[in-house]
Image: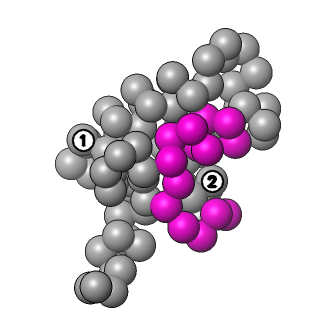
Amino acid sequence: MAFREWVVEILKEAGRPLHYREVGLKLKEKGHWREVQDPVKIARIRLSALARWHRSPVVALGKGVYALKEEADTSPAP
């Protein structure tokens, strides 16, 4: 499984947008990043790049928070 699929799985399990810190720590917890020394830093970099990709299932909501595109598109207006 690739980073993109891991992130989608984590966001679906959470059922809400997550900060990159939470995503990085969950990836480490699940054993996907056993060898990664600083999962928070790597998650910040990788999520930022993933959210900029035009076909990405993940979008940046601001201030380091990421959500699934389908959830962000259906969120009610304030």
Element class at badge 2 = helix
Residue at image position (40%, 26%) is 45
Report, in whole angstroms, how far the alpha carbon at label 1 lies from the one at label 2. 19 Å
Residue 2 visible in the picture: no
| 16 falls in the magenta region | yes
Q: Is residue 67 left or right of residue 33?
A: left
Q: Locate residue 23: give its quadrant.
A: top right
Question: What is the three-letter code of the residue carrying label 1?
Answer: Arg
Residue at image position (76%, 21%) is 34
Give the number of marks.
2
Tell me the crowding category of disc 1: few under 14, some 14 to 19, or many 20 or more residues within 10 angstroms, Cα based: few
Q: Locate residue 36: give its quadrant.
A: top right
Where is residue 75? Give x, y as percent.
Answer: 35, 80
Is the magenta region chiefly helix, strand or loop?
A: helix
Q: Nearer the viewer, residue 77 or 5?
A: 77
- Which mark is on residue 52? 1
Element class at badge 1 = helix
Residue at image position (62%, 18%) is 38
- Which mark is on residue 10? 2
Residue 54 visible in the picture: yes
Colour scheme employed for the rendering of this structure: one colour
Query: The magenta stretch spans which residues?
Result: 13-26
In this view, 33 is above or below 26: above
In this view, 77 is above or below 26: below
Where is residue 1? Give x, y as percent.
Answer: 62, 39
In this view, 10 is above or below 72: above
In primary-sequence order, the first of circles 1 and 2 is 2
